[in-house]
Image: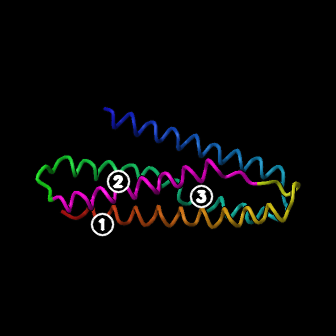
Amino acid sequence: MNSTKGLALILLVSLMACGKGGEHRAQEDSSTESGPNQALYDQVMDVHDEVMPRMGEINRLQRELKEKIASSPDMIAERKAELEQVISNLDSASNAMMTWMHEFNPLPDSVDQEKAREYLETEMERIRKVKTLMLESIEKAKEEGAKN
């Protein structure tokens, strides 16, 4: 039951954070409608929008791996440690996305186009790293989950 409540809380926070991203998009759209940095902003958000839906998959994989550990009391210590590391990596990927969404706060071009562009370039690097972390941790979790 606690697992279900925890998952519901995580999903709620994720959805609220996504809504926050939407606010950023609406705010940015109104301030730069066809500004010079709009295409870069859209690219950053496209990367986010591509991987954000995978947060549910990360939560599901964590739950499955934890259940695998719990249902195998005779599991070899090294195997248990491997699975716990995979769970930790999934958690890190999830936290990285949540942190990125919380910290993402683009500047409007009207403030300073050059600073706004630099900020978006930095954020593109950050969200690409989050994407890589998420995809790699998901892939590893699937591989480990398929093993006995």
Residue 33, located in which quarter of the rendered image? bottom right
Please state which of residues 39 and 113 is positioned toward the viewer in this rendering.
113
* Label 2 Cα neighbours within 10 Å, binned few <14 / some 14-19 / many ≥20: many
Q: Magenta span covers which residues?
A: 77-106
Which residue has dot 3 on it?
Answer: 48
Magenta residues: mostly which secondary structure?
A: helix
Please state which of residues 50 and 73 is positioned toward the viewer in this rendering.
73
Name the mark on residue 143: 1
Q: Residue at x 59, y 62 (%)?
A: 127
Looking at this rendering, what residue extends furthest in the left direction? 74
114 horizontally vs 97: left or right: right
Residue 114, located in which quarter of the rendered image? bottom right
Measure the C-alpha gap from mark 2 to mark 1: 11 Å
* Element marked by disc 3: helix
Residue 12 position, x and y percent, is 51, 38
Say which quadrant the C terminus sits in: bottom left
Measure the C-alpha gap from mark 3 to mark 1: 24 Å
**Disc 1 marks which amino acid?**
Glu
Which residue has dot 2 on it?
Answer: 61
Q: Residue at x 37, y 55 (%)?
A: 88
Q: Residue at x 25, y 58 (%)?
A: 81
Based on the picture, tell me whether residue 81 belongs to the magenta stretch.
Answer: yes
**Disc 2 marks which amino acid?**
Leu
* Element marked by disc 1: helix
Measure the C-alpha gap from mark 2 to mark 3: 20 Å
* Element marked by disc 2: helix
Name the mark on residue 46: none
Q: Is residue 71 above or below residue 80?
A: above
